[in-house]
Image (spheres, coloured by chain):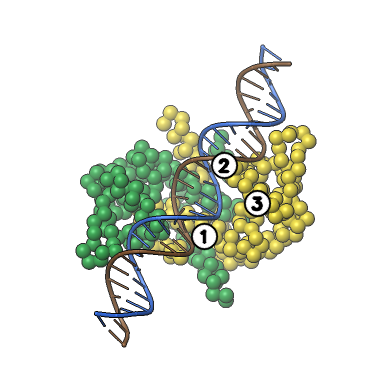
Chain colours: A yellow, B green, C blue, D brown
Amino acid sequence: MSMSSHELDAPPWLRVESTIMATARAIRQSYDKRFEGLGLNLSEASLLAYVAEHGSLSQTQIAKSLGLGRAATGALVDALQERELVRRETDPDDRRVWLVEVTIAGKELVEQVYESDQVLRKQLRAGITREERQQLAAVLVRLGNNLASVLAEEIETT
Amino acid sequence: MSMSSHELDAPPWLRVESTIMATARAIRQSYDKRFEGLGLNLSEASLLAYVAEHGSLSQTQIAKSLGLGRAATGALVDALQERELVRRETDPDDRRVWLVEVTIAGKELVEQVYESDQVLRKQLRAGITREERQQLAAVLVRLGNNLASVLAEEIETT
DNA sequence: GCCATACTGTATGGAGACATACTAACTAGG
DNA sequence: CCTAGTTAGTATGTCTCCATACAGTATGGC
């Protein structure tokens, strides 16, 4: 609602931050809505698609690849497992590990995830060139790196 | 360690979304950390600075300007009021309304907020030109508009 | 004046993620 | 061996926000 036009009259740091934040939230909302018919949210769909593509993976590997914590990843796997879209196999080489795999039903669902995604992506990209998208990503990554060093610095002796 | 943060190997939609999301979270974290010494988080600092600049405002006005919901705004005002950085005055013209004002102590703190912000902003902007920042904002806004129409469309059964 | 409607602020419950701490299990040094 | 340190997954508490529902108040049509 309040996301459409960003005429926030807020202090500058908040303006930047909240624009990014609001955009992120909106993307999540759009995808959640789009995937709703499939009974998935964005995170679940992402996990499912990722595992479908890369096969048997430990939860820690998944967490790292998806940029989530291990706890959050475990919860997602729980949810997907309950719907039998995914199953956990024991790792013969390491008894601590669950190897996560997509079931047949899961693979079928992934197809629909891809379709839904393509429709939505097209809408989101309207009026934004490929070049702009790439620049957006590049700047965000640099910003992320700056943030990482700021946070790291803060820990070391300040 | 967390330097190489973003080599996400995730599905494309998640890559875009999670980059934005992660960046937003990191910004929030950085500011929270920076404001920690002042006993504030980003949202509280923003609210405080905003009210300090614009004077007596209702919570709804503040919520709108800061891009938050009314409930969240009320909670922030509660927290700031408890520390006596802000006080609520009744509106003589409308008994539903609280007019929020910054106390003397609050105004002093705002000065420090500005200082902290300037230091951090400089670090975040390292290696990013003004032009790039403006483009970033512009693209985000367009993306936000696309998202808004997608969400709206979804409701109107177009 | 009286009523329907709209708006302010609050309470509550839920979503989604993180940080921390814990158990079980692996691994390397002696 | 066996102990210390590390890692995988889980449990718990917290944070920040949203959505919804509610009570009190305002406002405009009649």
Q: Give how far apart the Cα atoms at labels 3 and 2 are.
A: 27 Å
Evaluate whether residue A94 shows in this view.
yes
Q: Give how far apart the Cα atoms at labels 1 and 3 are.
A: 23 Å
Q: Marks 3 and 2: which is nearer the front? A: 3
Q: Which mark is residue B5?
A: 2
- Name the residue located 75 percent from the left edge and 39 percent from the top edge: A90
Q: Residue B16: name its quadrant.
A: bottom right
Chain containing mark 1: A
- Name the residue located 65 percent from the left edge and 51 percent from the top edge: A79
Viewer-proximal residue among A61 and B155: B155
- Name the residue located 59 percent from the left edge and 60 percent from the top edge: A32
- The picture places residue A55, in percent across and down from the top left corner, at 75, 47
Evaluate whether residue A121 shows in this view.
no
Going from N to C along the chain, the mark reached first, 1 or 3, is 1
Viewer-proximal residue among A17 and B44: B44
- Name the residue located 30 percent from the left edge and 60 percent from the top edge: B58
Q: Is residue B76 above or below residue A7?
A: above
Residue denoted by label 1: A26
- The picture places residue D1, in percent across and down from the top left corner, at 73, 16
Image position of D18 (left or right of B90)? right
Residue denoted by label 3: A79
Where the N terminus of chain B falls, by quadrant?
top right
Chain containing mark 2: B
Where the C terminus of chain B falls, by quadrant?
bottom right
Q: Secondary structure at mark 1?
A: helix
> Are the residues at dot 3 and dot 2 in contact (C-beta closer than 8 Å)?
no
